[in-house]
Amino acid sequence: MQRILAIAGLTWKAALRFKLFLVIAVLLFGAVVGLPLLIQDDGTARGFTQIILTYTLSAITALLGLSTLWLACGTLARDIEECQMQVVVTKPIARWQVWLGKWLGIVSLNAVLLAFSGACVYGLLQWRAGKLPAAEQQILREQVLVARGVAREKDFSAEIDAEAKQVLQERLKSNPVTTADLPEVQRQIREQVKAELQVVPGGYSSRPWQIDLGFAKNQLRDQPLQLRVKFNSANKSGSGTFVLVWQVGDPRSQKVWQSPPMSLAPDTVHEFQIPPNLIDTNGVLTIMAANPNDIALLFPLEDGIEVLYPEGGFALNFVRGLGIIFCWMALLAALGLAAASLLSFPVAAFFSLAMLVVILSSGTLADAVESGTVVGGNEETGVMGHSAADAVLIPMFKGILSVTRLVQNFSPIDSLSTGRVITWGELGLAFGQIVVLTGGVFALAGMALFHRRELAAVQGTQ
Amino acid sequence: MNLRAKKILLLLLAAVLLFGSGQIQKVLNRDRERLGLTRVNALDNAPPVLAFTTVALGGFRGLIANALWIRANDLQNDDKFFEAAQLATWITDLEPSFSQVWLFQAWNMAYNISVKFKDFPDRWRWVEHGIELLRDGGLRYNPDDVLIHRELAWFFQHKMGQNLDDANAFYKQQWALEMAPFFGPHGTNLSDLINPPDAAARTNALLLREKYKIDPEFARKVDAQYGPFDWRLPEAHAIYWGAQGLQKAKEHPDKVKADDLITLRRIIYQSMLQAFHHGRIIDDPFAKTSSLEPNLDLVAKVNDAYLQAYAEETQPNQKTGILKAHRNFLKDAVYFLYGSNRSGEAAKWYKLLGEKYPDNTILDDDTNSYPRNLTLDEYAVARVQAELGDTSQERTTAVVEKLIAESYYALALGQEERSVGFKLLARQVYDKFTNKIGKMQSNLERVGLPPFDVMNRTVLNRFLDQQQPVLPFAARAILRTQLGLPAESAATNAPPAAVPNAVENAPTNSAAK
């Protein structure tokens, strides 16, 4: 361990000697302090806080990410090219220890810089929030500067599948379909069954959503909750909105809250506060939506109705969010070092950036996988094109996506700016998937390559 | 020459050349516009950073604008709007001469994003963002662009003026609150803005020009040509920006399409119709609310606007549409004027209605309701009944009492003409029902109404009641003063003794007696 730490220390010294640490620290500080002066918000304290969180954390991630890649590629490749590594490896230290020491040095450097810039962002937010009027502060504390858990209705998949199966069997008895059509018929029946659970017909009718808050109900006494709703409509209304009236609470009890008529747009997430203590003794919150419009509205089972409840403070949530960003940096350090283990500095830097571009282009890859081709199709007819390369590229894209999703499935900046909780479990999962699994593969590859590399054969730059 | 002197000389030369190229640039910009060398005009009024950015980035700014546009679209799809204002600013800054970019971004804010919010103040903020983007940004860099003027006018006319958005009343209220300091409590104070009598008025006028980009002198011309308007309401501003657009079109005829001109004119006459329908703010000091009432002073000018629009329109189907709208306008004008005790004017427009559209019915459910078959009184009463439903005894009693109540409330608000108008209508409805059921005693006993004076007294008693007050004290006091009644005595359980006399003094109008 001492040897690894010694290499990590040398990496630190190099970073300080080349003033990299200072330059990055100044840039980060500039981003944190300067961005709020340049960015135009939507005019609300909530919007200002959200945009500051998003832009400063994105800027920090981008700056640190690029500097990490650069440093990781440079510190190993240059040491090899400048023949310093030939001296180091004559010492009683294994090459994997050198590699790991470099990685540890870079991630510890990142940890310090991330902690510094994170503390600046946190301090800035608290300072700005403290200067707001009490009402605005309350909104911020309830909706953004908080860690809110999400409760949804129970998963109906099993019931839907069972019901769909039964309906299908009855349908087949009366009206047999060909084998080729069967999957489509199954899909349509399932959607019909699902729709029955999602639709709120017009005319003041509603089905109750029963959301079990479980053990959280004990901590939620006297705490106002937020209802997060989203619905779709088949037709547009003249005003672009639909009126809905909400009733929350157990209808058999006296503790029922009814909202004033709300003018809500479809296909949009709406959040509003509901009074405390509406949860029944079993920890279930009952919600009804009266739909006075003359058309049916559809509340998706997945995210149509959600209850957001305070689950923790912003500070720890912020730390966990930074923790996930830190995991990304650790992965980038492993990627850069792995590339530099085999390649010269410019090629390693190019390769690492190319990998980063691939990760950032996962949306394009996902589109290609979804459409089954890389050549696109006719937007008007909906007919997809076809290419001979599809046979190779589509499976390859699927493979790339399955790896990149291990890394991209976490969105700490989004969660922090919308006041969503990032659980310890999520952080642990991020560490496992990003650092241990993905980073581990790069680390093993990098160590193996570095171990087998003939250092004396490298053409020095000096 | 030593090195230092040489450097200073070169620097001076560079400065002179830079200044010279700046001067030549103006000539070049004029020439390229005159000779049609580029489709894009030189950017005027841009701050140095924006001017530098647009030049330095060259063709790449289009790519960056595209990337920002994609991000804005993605975020909007995810219901994240907090970046929308920033992204719109960046996109428009990158393409400041491209008016469609301004139009889309502003429309997106005012129409798409605003309705995504359930709270009206949030919606209003986005509508204002849209207006500001066009007015403060779009027109700054494209001061002669007719499309931007048209869109700005459209926001005022359609988004704020019409009632399609559930929050339209809130928009009107907020705009009226913003405009009241400039245009005064009645929204008509243009003279103080044109010739400010003191420092405060000068500041006001300056603020109106600088912040809201409204030229009081031009506003006065618009008011004289199309008004009089209450400038606290959005329709006046829709007409202002529409008229500005027409003015710019006149100055730059080569840049205007015929369709754009038609749209501008249409916005103006449609805004005038809206202003006629709800172009006056009536403050209710008792309920601490405001309501919108017809602006009957606009009738003649709205009529002229329709005739002008008809004359200018080239498409036959549009011409037919204008005629139909004109007929509906005349019907409303007659009814509103009659209800405001402006019977002379009502008769004049009713006569025109009959002359211009003799073969069209004027009541929805009556196939024989040609103007020649109905008197003005009959038409007005039929309109009341059509609006208020069936003509049963219970319903008619409620209608008559409602009209009497409206009459007394208008009197308490100081609207004497409206008060008399409502009382006149109440009497007409009463008489028509009584005539309909006949004078037979049995009918009168079975389905007849109470005597009109009794109904009048009942309503007034309710309004003046101290024990279970319908009106606040101030309103009761005004009503008593208007009716010549003694002041209220201390609260007792006794019935209000003065009321029977009040009925005799009340403005039940002579025609009704």
Image (spheres, grey):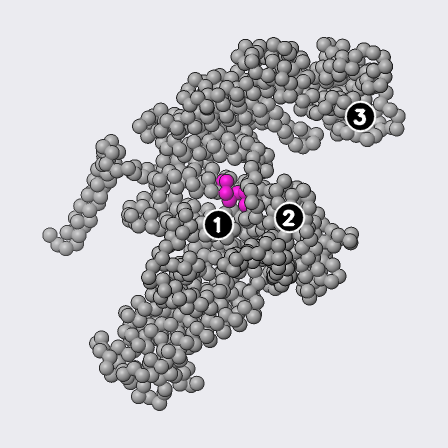
Q: Judging from the image, what secondary structure is the residue with disc 3 in?
A: helix
Q: Name the residue nearer the viewer: B465 or B267.
A: B267
Q: Amino acid at mark 2?
A: Val
Q: Residue at x 54, y 52 (%)?
A: A46
Q: CA distance from mark 3 to mark 2?
A: 44 Å
The residue at the point 49 percent across, 23 percent down is B321
Q: Earlier in the sequence, mark 1 or mark 3?
A: 1
Query: Quadrant of residue B152 in the image?
Result: top left
Percent of width and height locating residue B251:
34, 25
Which of the two discs, 3 and 2, sits closer to the camera?
A: 2
Q: Amino acid at mark 3?
A: Arg
Q: Which mark is residue B462?
A: 3
Q: Quick check: is B17 in the magenta stretch?
A: no
Q: Which residue is mark 1?
A: B76
Eye-nearest disc, 1 or 3: 1
Q: Nearer the viewer, residue A374 or B390?
A: A374
Residue type beneath disc 1: Gln
Q: Are marks 3 and 2 in contact (CB under 8 Å)?
A: no
Q: Is residue B264 above or below residue B420?
A: below
Q: Is residue B296 left or right of residue B27?
A: right
Residue span colored magenta: B110-117
| Chain letter for the residue marked with disc 1 in the picture | B
Q: Residue at x 33, y 30 (%)?
A: B255
Q: Tell me the tag on residue A200.
A: 2
